[in-house]
Image: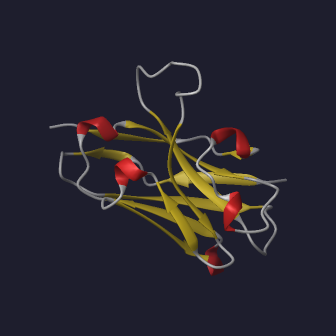
C-alpha cells in the first residue's frame, strides 16, 4: 500500500523559508515520480484547484519546477530515506496554501513527471503553509 506523508509546514513571515518533506512508503524502491502540488484558499475554478509546484524523477534526479516559482523553489531527494524535499525560499503571502505530495504508478522516465494532478494516483494528506506578517 502506497503511503505519502508530508511534514514541515507551518507559519512563516514574508521573505522566510520552509522545507517540506514527503516520506514515501510502499512505492517501488526503484524509480519514483513524485510531485508537489498546492491548493490555495479561494481557488475553486475547475481544473485550477491544485497547482503544480515541482516534481522529480528519482532515478536520474530530473526535475520540473513551475515557471512562476523558478528561482524560489528547489526539489530534492534522499533515496536512503525514501524522502523528497521541497525547499521554498522568499515566501510570500500568495504562497499560503495546503501543499500536497503525490506519486504515480506509471514512472518510466522524466516524461512522467508532468505537473498535472490527474497524472498522479497517490496523494498525501497535505501540510499547511501560511505566510503572513
The spot of residue 102 in percent (x, y) is 65, 49
The spot of residue 14 in percent (x, y) is 18, 45
Residue at the farthest left position:
133
Q: Residue at x 82, y 68 (%)?
A: 28
Q: Residue at x 55, y 73 (%)?
A: 77
- Quadrant for residue 90, please give it: bottom left
- Position of residue 57 relative to residue 38, above or below, is below
- Quadrant for residue 119, please give it: top right
Along the viewing direction, whichever of 123 and 64 lies nearer the viewer: 64
Is 15 on the left or on the right of 39, as rendered?
left
Is 107 on the left or on the right of 81, as rendered?
right
Scheme of image coloration: secondary structure
The spot of residue 118 in percent (x, y) is 70, 38
Along the viewing direction, whichever of 61 and 79 lies nearer the viewer: 61
Residue at the farthest right position:
1
Is 6 on the left or on the right of 106, as rendered?
left
- Quadrant for residue 25, please give it: bottom right
Q: Residue at x 24, y 43 (%)?
A: 92
- Position of residue 133 relative to residue 66, above or below, is above
Label tally = 0
Along the viewing direction, whichever of 51 and 81 lies nearer the viewer: 51
- Position of residue 86 relative to residue 132, above or below, is below
The spot of residue 60 in percent (x, y) is 64, 79
Quadrant where the image shows the C terminus: top left
Q: Residue at x 69, y 62 (%)?
A: 111
Amino acid at each position: 500500500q502506497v503511503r505519502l506523508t508530508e511534514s514541515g509546514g507551518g507559519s512563516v513571515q514574508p521573505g522566510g523559508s520552509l522545507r517540506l518533506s514527503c516520506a514515501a512508503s510502499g512505492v517501488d524502491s526503484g524509480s519514483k515520480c513524485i510531485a508537489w502540488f498546492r491548493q490555495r484558499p479561494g481557488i475553486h475554478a475547475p481544473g485550477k484547484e491544485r497547482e503544480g509546484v515541482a516534481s522529480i524523477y528519482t532515478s536520474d534526479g530530473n526535475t520540473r519546477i513551475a515557471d512562476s516559482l523558478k528561482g524560489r523553489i528547489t526539489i530534492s531527494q534522499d533515496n536512503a530515506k525514501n524522502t523528497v524535499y521541497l525547499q521554498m525560499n522568499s515566501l510570500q503571502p500568495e504562497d499560503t496554501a495546503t501543499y500536497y505530495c503525490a506519486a504515480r504508478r506509471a514512472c518510466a522516465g522524466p516524461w512522467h513527471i508532468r505537473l498535472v494532478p490527474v497524472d498522479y494516483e497517490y496523494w498525501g494528506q497535505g501540510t499547511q503553509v501560511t505566510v503572513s506578517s
